[in-house]
Amino acid sequence: MTTTFPDISISTERLVLRPFDEDDVPALAEMMNDEQVMAWTDVPQPFTEDGARTWITEYAPGERTGGRGLDLAVTEFLTQRLVGLIQLTKTNWHVRSTELLYVIAPWARGEGYASEAALATARWLFRDQKFERIELRTAADNTASQQVAQKIGCISEGVLRNACIARARTEEGWAEIRTDYIVWSLLPEDLEGVSEELADSGGFTSYSIWN
């Protein structure tokens, strides 16, 4: 039984999702130092270029070959500029399930890249990798990320109380705050009709603040 993800690229109308390479170091570091990324993720802060290089050359390849997950750079098809990342983690190969996370660079928000990249990844997982479940977790106050989950067809399953550590800016600097996680799931049958709904709504709606 396959227990690792292939080294692949996924293309959509506007995006290419591909493995990170060292040319992405400056853009990845800049993206991960954004205040919204800082607020809603647990990435180390400040996120240095050395940290980005270690992520790209050591962490991401190790997660893939170890069967734990997959990190993909989300780039614009026309410009090849890094607009975000998709991460699969906590993969269970027996259950055929994984958790999906996404981040979009500040300058690229408002273009619908989040839902487009997440939906393309979900289709690939279900059709090519034969997965049966994708899980998303969004902080209770991260409403924009929740809207992305809804847009691609996810179903809310419940709340994990006090399970998330977020960060908030105070007069003294950044402080950690405890909040709830909303758990979402996506199954193969949930994708039925998603493309038609997106077409009817005019495409991939996007949101200005999200993880």
Image (spheres, rainbow, N blue to C red):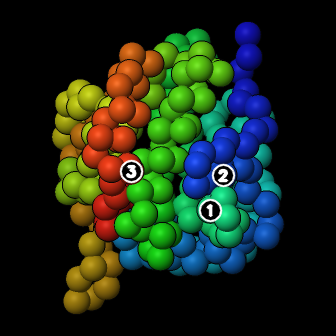
* Mark 2 lies on residue: 16
In the rendered image of this protein, does residue 180 appear above or below residue 110? above
* Mark 1 lies on residue: 76
Residue 27 in sight here: yes
In depth, the one of 148 and 91 nearer the eye is: 148
In which quadrant is the N terminus drawn?
top right
Residue located 22% across and 89% down the image: 171
Residue located 34% across and 58% down the image: 206
Q: Amino acid at mark 3?
A: Phe
In depth, the one of 157 and 163 nearer the eye is: 157
In the rendered image of this protein, does residue 91 appear above or below residue 31? above
The picture quadrant where one finds residue 51 is bottom right
* Mark 3 lies on residue: 204
Q: Amino acid at mark 1?
A: Glu
Residue located 59% across and 20% down the image: 127
Mark 2–mark 1 contact, CB under 8 Å?
A: yes
In depth, the one of 193 and 2 nearer the eye is: 193
Nearer mark to the viewer, of 2 and 3: 3
Between discs 2 and 3, the one toward the N terminus: 2
**Real-space Cα separation, disc 2 to disc 1, in angstroms:** 6 Å
Residue located 60% across and 16% down the image: 130
Q: Amino acid at mark 2?
A: Val
Q: Element under label 3?
A: loop
x and y, in percent, of residue 9 in the image: 73, 43
The picture quadrant where one finds residue 156 is top left
x and y, in percent, of residue 112 in the image: 41, 57
Crowdedness near tag 1: few (<14), some (14–19) or many (≥20) residues, C-alpha within 10 Å: many
x and y, in percent, of residue 179 in the image: 21, 53
Between discs 2 and 1, the one toward the N terminus: 2
